Amino acid sequence: MNKLIFRKFSLDVLNFFLIASFSITFIVWIIQAVNFLDLVSDDGHSLRVYFYYVSLNLPKIFSKTIIFVFFISVFYMINKYNNANELLVFWSNGIKKISFINFILKISILFLILQLTFNLFIVPKSQKLARIFIKESNIDFLPKLISEKKFINVVKNLTIFVEEYKEDGILKKIYINEKIDANKSKIIVADKGKIIKKNNQLYLRLYNGGITNLNTENSFALDFSETDYDLSNFTTKSTTHPKTQEIESVILFQCFKEFFLKRNKSKNNFKSYKNQNCEGRKLKSIIDELYKRSILPLYTLIISLVAASLIVEPKSKYFFKFHKLNIFLAGSLIIILSQISLKFLLNSISITYIVLLLPILLVIFYYLLLLLITKLKLNFL
């Protein structure tokens, strides 16, 4: 009988969690997708690239909502059971309050494993795939971005100006400024041109114009009647270098290990390491990312205990009136604390140890407090 009661409660929590998490994730995803529209409008990518990129951000959004939605799910279901007097079913069947708390703690371990799986494996992989897709994609939306009498600079080191853009795709009075390096540049002008596609690459076919090569020492010019200007040589302005959050967790741990094996005491930069992903990265960024992936999910345990403490009602009428609000605020403050704690990493050795051990210390302290209240049946305020 007790197993059936606990199974029903766990299924209710799971159902509410799935509905709430998917709803919140979808809303945040829509807002974020709007912010990513500059991939098309400014960086010249196609709608296919855009939708693929924003879709790969779904695991990241979901992983960030797990701890909060789990707290809301447990809090809501306990409150719902309490308002409907369904918690009496637990107590009338001989289930002790500490047993109920232990059960919620066990559920939180499953959600902890879920969040660790996303943080350590799924999210870095999806972010890496998104970055690779951006890096390897062609700027195939460029023709639609070109407009009359407007400077277009959707790709690095290239600016295009067109005086007139006809409906048949013919460009009139074309100006191109290509920056080769810090000291060299190339200017191309043409009477007309047209964007064509050869071998799945974009070219700008130009007619009746001239090319001027400029550098700090001299310059030279030449005329042409027809030439093809290869646009595939240019890369998108989108960041293509992998960010720390896109690196696999195993590699990050290797970077962290290599830092202490081959660290440069004058600088916290990685230099001359076998793993190129470590090159030039800050120790702070590596530790922050590892902390977010492996330590922050541990706050799921303390959050579950805080939500479970709803069943430990205070005796005082004054505190009973604000009991639910206090529990909700306590849980919210712990979630905020988990995010703020990141700022104190590496401030000092002692503070770093405290920050790393804080979620475990909170779990032990709060559990012992609940154990003391429920086992000894102490009057709660």
Image (spheres, rainbow, N blue to C red):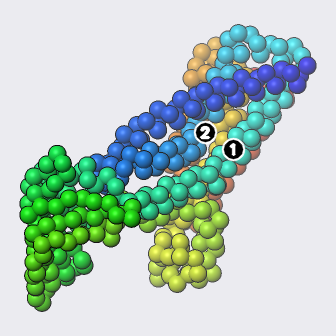
**Element at badge 2?**
helix
Q: Position of residue 252 (x, y in %)?
A: 60, 66
Q: Say left or right for 184 vs 222.
A: right
Residue drawn where x is 24% and y is 77% of the image: 180
Q: Say left or right for 8 vs 158.
A: right
Q: Say left or right for 138 vs 279.
A: left
Q: Quadrant of residue 142?
A: bottom left
Q: Say left or right for 131 vs 368.
A: left
Q: Which residue appears farthest toward the top when viewing the image?
A: 84
Pick the front one: 211 or 199: 199
Q: Position of residue 66 (x, y in %)?
A: 60, 39
Q: Which residue is mark 1?
A: 114
Residue drawn where x is 69% and y is 44% of the image: 114
Which label is found at residue 261?
none
Pick the front one: 92 or 246: 246
- The correct choice, above or below, for 227 with respect to 367 in the image is below
Q: Position of residue 86 (x, y in %)?
A: 76, 12
Q: Quadrant of the C terminus?
A: top right
Residue type at the position of mark 2 = Ile
Q: Which residue is mark 2?
A: 66
Whether residue 375 is visible to the viewer of this picture, yes or no, is yes
Q: Quadrant of residue 337?
A: top right
Q: Position of residue 227 (x, y in %)?
A: 20, 72
Residue drawn where x is 50% and y is 34% of the image: 26
Residue type at the position of mark 1 = Leu
- The correct choice, above or below, for 254 with respect to 261 in the image is above
Q: Quadrant of the N terminus?
A: top right
**Element at badge 1?**
helix
Alpha carbons under labels 2 and 1: distance apart: 9 Å
Q: Are marks 2 and 1 in contact (CB under 8 Å)?
A: yes
Residue drawn where x is 53% and y is 73% of the image: 278
